[in-house]
Each structure stands twice: as C-alpha cells, then as structure tokens.
Image (cartoon, rainbow, N blue to C red):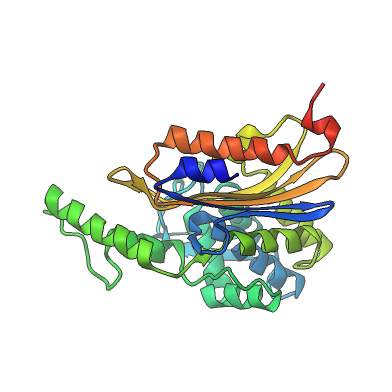
Amino acid sequence: MTQLADKARPGVLGITVVDLDPHTRTRINADRAYPMMSVFKAPVAAAVLAQIDEGRIAPGQEVTIDKEDVVGGAAVPSIGAHFKGKRMRFTVDRLLVAAVSESDNTAVDTLVRLVGGPRVVTTYLRKHRIDGMRVDLSEGDVSDIFEDTVKGQTIREDETEAAELARRRRGYQAYMADPRNRTTPDAAADFLEKLWKGDLLSAASTKRLLGLMVDQTVPNRMRAGLPTGLRFADKCGTSYTLEGETAAFNDIGIVTWPDGHTVIVAAFLTGSQADQKARNALFAEIGKLVAGTAPAPWRHPG
C-alpha cells in the first residue's frame, strides 16, 4: 500500500483496509480528512433508511421535485437527465436507487431535504460513534463552491474564457480548503463495518443499502481489480478536473468472498495530477491488493 501512495504523488492517497477475520487494520495516510464528493450518498441513504426503520418515512412515499431543484451530474443518466416539465414526483425508494446505484445528484439532494438537512445526517453518524465523517453540504452546495457562486452570484452570459478560468480557479481552491463534507479513511471504514454488522439499520434496511451499493457498477474502480466471484458493495466519489488536477477520486466498499470472508476498504485520492486512465489503474491495483488478503484458495486462484 505504501508503494501505491508513493505512486499517487503529488496527490495524497489515503487508505484504510479492515480484514474482519481476523480483525486487522492496515492504514496509509488515514488520519487526515479527504473530500468525499459522492461517497457521502451512502451515509445519506443510511440516514434515510434509519427514518424508514423508525416509521417516519415510507419507501413508497412520493416526493415532489421542482425543476429549479434539479442538479446536474450522475454516473449514469438518471433523474436529473430525464427530468421533464416543471415538477415530477418520485418514490423514496426510486430516489434511493438513483442516489446510490446511479449517483444522481438531484436524487440525493432531495433525500437530504427529506430527512431534514445535512446536519441530520451528521447527527445520525455521531449517534453511531462515527466521528471522523461529516455531512454539511448538498451536491448543489458543492457545485456552488466549485463554480464560485456560493453567495448567490450568477455567471455572466458574456463571461470571457479568462474570467471563467479565474472563477473556476477560485472555486477549486475554495473547495480544497473547505473542511465540510469530509471524512477520514478510518471513519469511512467504520461506517462500512457498522453497516455490514447491522449496527446502523434494521436487517431489511441493511440488506437494502448493501444491495444498492452492489448495483453501483459505474464507475468501475477497485471493482476492476477484484477477481470474478467476489461480491463488492461500494460507493465512488469524483470531482471534476481543473488544469490537470483532480480534487477527489474515491471508492469505499465491502468485499465478500463466497465463504463469507469479508474485507472493508476505504480509498481516497485528493490533489491528483494523474490522468483518468492512471487513476483508474491505481484503484484497480488497490482492488488487487485487497483481494490478496483473502484465504489461500482465493489468493492463488486455480
């Protein structure tokens, strides 16, 4: 793992790997906070499912989304991309699928509003003693930081390319310096372990969230390095790239072998100057190394 962190420079790669049997933990640059981007959709979904467990929300409950609430961005074309008219209604269950499996930004922001705002998600995490992960912002809020429109500024229609670049530079620097929507790899691993062990949700809701994470097949990061036959429940997060630097490129997940052996991994890359192909290759290599923690028959297939 240390070699991978060296390879990631000048970006910073933070990794926590927890082998649940025996309970061992491997850590690289794991004591600092990293920007989550869409990784935060997993704890948001957990907070929603917790309210479903409490009877405060129903999976079939319909929620109205107005056109002005649509936020761009999704791993696959989803709610935001197919929005029609002035408003549409979606069930909570459909929003969960869109937010976690499809990484739709409009869906997760709707769910954040539904549970009562970002602070409710953080309070939920603290209740379960997950202290190094915080949710303070919606996807729309993050977009405003990157676009340098936080204080209600609008982007001029006649903005020059030089002015646009200057604005994006301000936004990028502001996002990199912002402590909100951050997590340590250790805290992300704690979240996954508590989820896996059923400490966060009912059995039904735990199964539901893990299934949604298994169904997130795009982007294909650590998953690309795992052998066929392993189950991987993960959530990725990605920022845009400005002038060759990517603020966040992440993947957290739970790897399970057919015999039940389970390994948790949380990997966060920030400030990377590698291109997308190199970043994908780096995360595939992390997946290969994680797979090497399995029992001997799986470490040496065939």
Which residue does the image show at 14% across and 48% down from the upper left? 161
The one of 4 and 199 positioned closer to us in this rendering:
4
238 vs 149: above or below: above
Residue 137 placed where, x, y %? 46, 69
Residue 68 visible, this orientation: no
| Residue 198 left/right relative to 36 | right
Image x and y of residue 73, in percent: 43, 50
Quarter of the image with the N terminus in it: top right
Is residue 57 among the parts visible in the rendering? yes
Identify the residue shown where x is 48% and y is 57%: 37
Q: Position of residue 89 (x, y in %)?
A: 54, 60
| Left or right of residue 31, residue 59 in this image | right
Residue 215 horizontal/vertical position (percent)? 66, 43
- Left or right of 295 on screen, residue 222: left
Query: Which residue is at a point 63% across and 33% down the rendered structure image?
Result: 225
Q: Quadrant of the C terminus?
A: top right
Q: What residue do we see at 13% from left, 50% from top?
A: 162
